[in-house]
Amino acid sequence: MGQFILVVRKDLFLSFQAKLVLSRLSDSLIAIREQFEWPGTILGGGEPAIVCYFKTDNHAKKILKEVSNSLYSWVQPDLPEDLSFMKGNNLWLVNTSHESESYFVTEEKEELEEILGIRNIKIKQK
């Protein structure tokens, strides 16, 4: 089973809706850490952010699908930030919501073919 993260910036307001999402996800919570860095982001100073680690279980998947249909809507104050996914301890989908940028980390050919087959996806390959 994989994991995902959501980030709460201490220097930004967090809406009631965002707090409710975190509360609903609490059964899938693995850990909460204060960090200056998380996938796709390094803070340049100030206060660390709160990075919440969750199990990608059926409970969490259902909530994520109900809350949003866009990776780029995961921006404070409306929602926690930067929904990103890991397979085991390896990054898989890194999302920087406020920049509207995401990238996959994989070398599996079948997985790459599936990603490239997603309708309306814009791909920049390295």
Image (cartoon, rainbow, N blue to C red):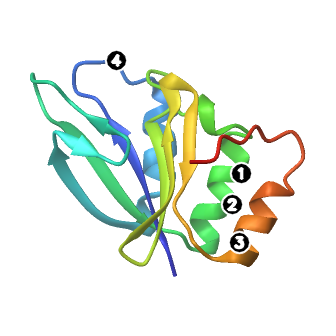
Secondary structure state at the residue bearing disc 3? helix
Residue 9 position within the rendered picture, expressed as x and y whole percent measured from the top left: 28, 29
Camera-nearest residue between 86 and 6: 86
Secondary structure state at the residue bearing disc 2? helix
Q: Amino acid at mark 4?
A: Phe
Q: Are marks 4 and 3 in contact (CB under 8 Å)?
A: no
**Image quadrant in which you'd find residue 10:** top left
Count residues near mark 1 (Cα–Cα under 10 Å), then give few for <14, some for 14-19, many for 20+.
few
The residue pinned by badge 4 equals 13
Q: Which mark is residue 65?
A: 1
Q: Looking at the picture, does residue 105 appear above or below residue 24?
A: below
Instruction: Identify the residue shown where x is 79% and y is 67%.
Output: 113
Label 4 vs 3, first from the N-terminus: 4
Q: CA distance from mark 4 to mark 3?
A: 37 Å
Marks 3, 1: nearer the viewer:
3
Label 2 vs 4, first from the N-terminus: 4
Residue at the outermost left position: 46
Q: Are marks 2 and 4 in contact (CB under 8 Å)?
A: no
**From the viewer's perspective, is 89 left or right of 99?**
left
Residue 89 position within the rendered picture, expressed as x and y whole percent measured from the top left: 35, 74
Label 1 vs 4, first from the N-terminus: 4
Instruction: Identify the residue shown where x is 43% and y is 36%.
Output: 19
**From the viewer's perspective, is 121 left or right of 106?**
right
Q: CA distance from mark 2 to mark 4?
A: 25 Å
The residue pinned by badge 3 equals 111
Q: Amino acid at mark 2?
A: Lys
**From the viewer's perspective, is 35 left or right of 65?**
left
Q: CA distance from mark 3 to mark 1?
A: 21 Å
Q: Looking at the picture, does residue 65 appear above or below residue 120?
A: below
**From the viewer's perspective, is 108 left or right of 24?**
right
The residue pinned by badge 2 equals 62
Q: Amino acid at mark 1?
A: Lys
